[in-house]
Image (cartoon, rainbow, N blue to C red):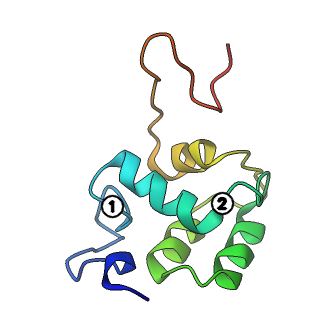
Amino acid sequence: MSAQRRPSPTAFPETDAYLGLGHDTPSARRELSHWLGREVFPADREALLRHARVVGAPGTVGAALERLPARRSFHTVYDLWAALSGATERAPAGRRYPDERA
């Protein structure tokens, strides 16, 4: 694994707003997306955890996925991030994120 893919030694997922996945919301969501891809969705927590193990995702990704509610289906990484962070983002005017309804 390259040094670029490793979490920083100061990342504490249990207290970090971005769960040790990045320095802001887009980078944290991008880290999840990098390891999970699109093909895994829709999926529940257990399927996401299995996939993360198969692809060799780092511990910060697994720790974040462990926080997801059980028996709930997630359709996109945006949906997954909203469940983890409690935050949703709005796309800039005139654009829509994949999980936004018109």
Please determine whether, in this image, residue 13 is positioned above or below residue 37: below
Picture quadrant where residue 66 is located: bottom right
Instruction: Tell me the quarter of the picture where residue 39 sits.
Output: bottom right
Q: Which residue is mark 2?
A: 37
**Circle 2 SS class:** loop
x and y percent of residue 17 in the render? 31, 55
Tell us which disc is closer to us: 2 or 1: 2
Q: Secondary structure at mark 1?
A: loop
Quadrant location of the C terminus in the rendered image: top right
Q: Position of residue 13 (x, y in %)?
A: 35, 71
Horizontal and vertical percent for residue 38? 71, 54
Please tell me whether residue 27 is drawn above or below residue 94 in the rendered image.
Answer: below
Query: What's the residue at 55%, 79% (across, down)?
Result: 57
Q: Residue at x 40, y 56 (%)?
A: 28
Q: Position of residue 79 (x, y in %)?
A: 62, 43
Disc 2 residue crowd, few under 14, some 14–19, many 20+, Cα 10 Å: some
Q: Is residue 72 shown left or right of residue 14?
A: right
> Label 1 crowding class (10 Å Cα cut-off): few <14, some 14-19, many 20+?
some
In this picture, residue 74 sits left or right of residue 27? right
Position of 6 with respect to 41 (left or right) is: left
Q: Assess whether mark 1 and mark 2 are in contact (beta carbons under 8 angstroms).
A: no
Q: Amino acid at mark 2?
A: Gly
For image coordinates 33% across by 61% down, the residue present is 22
Q: Earlier in the sequence, mark 2 or mark 1?
A: 1
Alpha carbon separation for disc pair 2 and 1: 17 Å
Q: Which mark is residue 22?
A: 1
Q: Quadrant of the N terminus?
A: bottom left
Residue type, mark 1 in image: Gly
User: Furthest-bottom residue in view?
Assistant: 1
